Amino acid sequence: GIQVEQSPPDLILQEGANSTLRCNFSDSVNNLQWFHQNPWGQLINLFYIPSGTKQNGRLSATTVATERYSLLYISSSQTTDSGVYFCAVHPTGGGNKLTFGTGTQLKVEL
Amino acid sequence: SAVISQKPSRDICQRGTSLTIQCQVDSQVTMMFWYRQQPGQSLTLIATANQGSEATYESGFVIDKFPISRPNLTFSTLTVSNMSPEDSSIYLCSVEGGGTDTQYFGPGTRLTVL
């Protein structure tokens, strides 16, 4: 099956810093989503982004499907950005099944 | 988007017992999905539940261990049977919504098995 790898696995930032999270996938996909899992376990949708670039406030995402990767940019990070960031893909021909990446654990410190 | 609730939010259970987790959606949906997230790990799909048909289980998950019901288009249950400490996980349900195949997740059920 498709492999979805995220990097870095762990990241510590000072408040106000910027960061880039990466998601690599091993096969073609129909779509890609980015999620933030807060410390209480809730998964929050950030982006539905099968291709191109989207921005939402301090967050933006870019997916280059032909090169099989996606990037999530966090600018001016805040302590509330802490948690785990997951990308998840619908593999082409895989129906509605979402395959999740390995995750990036982010901690933002004062 | 869809608003999804789960019950219970957390539970502590004894090994050998069973727990049924409920998932309620605020709109009618064709498919509902159940995921497991073991401690410190990513999410893994357990099964896909369509209303009016048997659930489709992923490799490594079986109906006897994780029976699923889908009585209508807004509700589903997942039972974790004959539990062992290895079943300690967060269990999440999700649905597609918003006119695309975007998936939305419930708040999860945090299960601890002693």
Image (cartoon, helix red, strand yellow):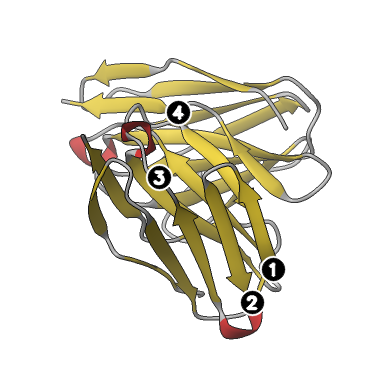
Observer-nearest residue: A9 or B75? A9
Query: Which residue is farthest left?
Result: B114
Asked which secondary structure carries label 1, the reply is loop
The residue that appears at 69% across and 68% down in the rendered structure is: A51
Picture coordinates of residue A18 (x, y %)? 37, 54
Disc 1 marks which residue? A51
A79 left or right, relative to B91: left
Residues at marks 2 and 3 on the same chain: yes
Disc 4 marks which residue? B108
Type of amino acid under label 1: Ser
Instruction: Report if the CB atoms under discs 1 and 2 are less than 8 Å apart.
Output: yes
Residues at marks 3 and 1 on the same chain: yes
C-alpha span from label 1 to label 4: 29 Å
The residue that appears at 42% across and 34% down in the rendered structure is: B91
Observer-nearest residue: A65 or A98? A65
Select label 1 or label 4 by which is in front.
1
Quadrant of the rendered image containing residue A60: bottom right
* CA neighbours of label 4 inside 10 A, class few (<14), some (14 to 19), many (20+): many
B26 left or right, relative to A4: right
Disc 2 marks which residue? A65
Observer-nearest residue: A52 or A32? A52
Residues at marks 1 and 2 on the same chain: yes
* CA neighbours of label 1 inside 10 A, class few (<14), some (14 to 19), many (20+): some
What is the chain letter for disc 3? Answer: A
C-alpha span from label 2 to label 3: 27 Å
As drawn, the label of residue A76 is 3
What is the chain letter for disc 2? Answer: A
Select label 4 or label 2 by which is in front.
2
